Image (cartoon, helix red, strand yellow):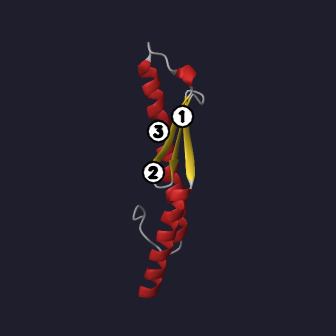
Amino acid sequence: MLRQLQEMQEKMARIQEDLGRKEVEGTSGGGVVTVRANGQQKILSVEINPDAVDPQDVELLQDMVLAAVNEALDRSRELATDELGQLTAGIGLPPGLI
């Protein structure tokens, strides 16, 4: 059993490393704002179409950035859950433990 736990730890470390190399994207405003994040919930880039920059409506741009960031982070968490779920499938861990 101890050997299995060690193997599982090693696999989890590899998965975490792989998640750092995988990327997801969140967009808002019909693609006006695009945010890329990795599988470790780190924001990698924020791209804003210059046409979206209206000095008279900064609030709209802020809302679009916030929405794109949240979408990217949601997708990143889903990716991590899927990847880590493959590791723990079939070993009977309670839900929410990973």
Cα separation, mark 3 vs mark 2, equals 10 Å
What amino acid is found at the position of numbered circle 1 in the picture?
Glu
User: 10 Å neighbourhood of mark 1: few (<14), some, or many (≥20)?
Assistant: some
Image coords of residue 31 (percent x, y): 60, 31
Q: Mark 3: which secondary structure?
A: helix
| Residue drawn 50% across the image and 54% down it | 39
What amino acid is found at the position of numbered circle 2 in the picture?
Gln
User: Depth check: 38 or 2 in front?
Assistant: 38
Q: In terms of sequence position, does the residue under pointer 1 or pointer 2 come before the other?
A: 2
Residue at numbered disc 3 = 69
Image coords of residue 3 (percent x, y): 45, 87
| Residue drawn 42% across the image and 20% down it | 58
Q: In terms of sequence position, does the residue under pointer 3 or pointer 2 come before the other?
A: 2
Quadrant of image for the N terminus: bottom left
User: 10 Å neighbourhood of mark 3: few (<14), some, or many (≥20)?
Assistant: many
| Residue drawn 44% across the image and 33% down it | 66
Image coords of residue 14 (percent x, y): 51, 69
Image height check: is 53 above or below 13? above
Image coords of residue 71 (percent x, y): 50, 40
Q: Mark 2: which secondary structure?
A: loop
Q: In terms of sequence position, does the residue under pointer 1 or pointer 3 come before the other?
A: 1
Residue at numbered disc 2 = 41
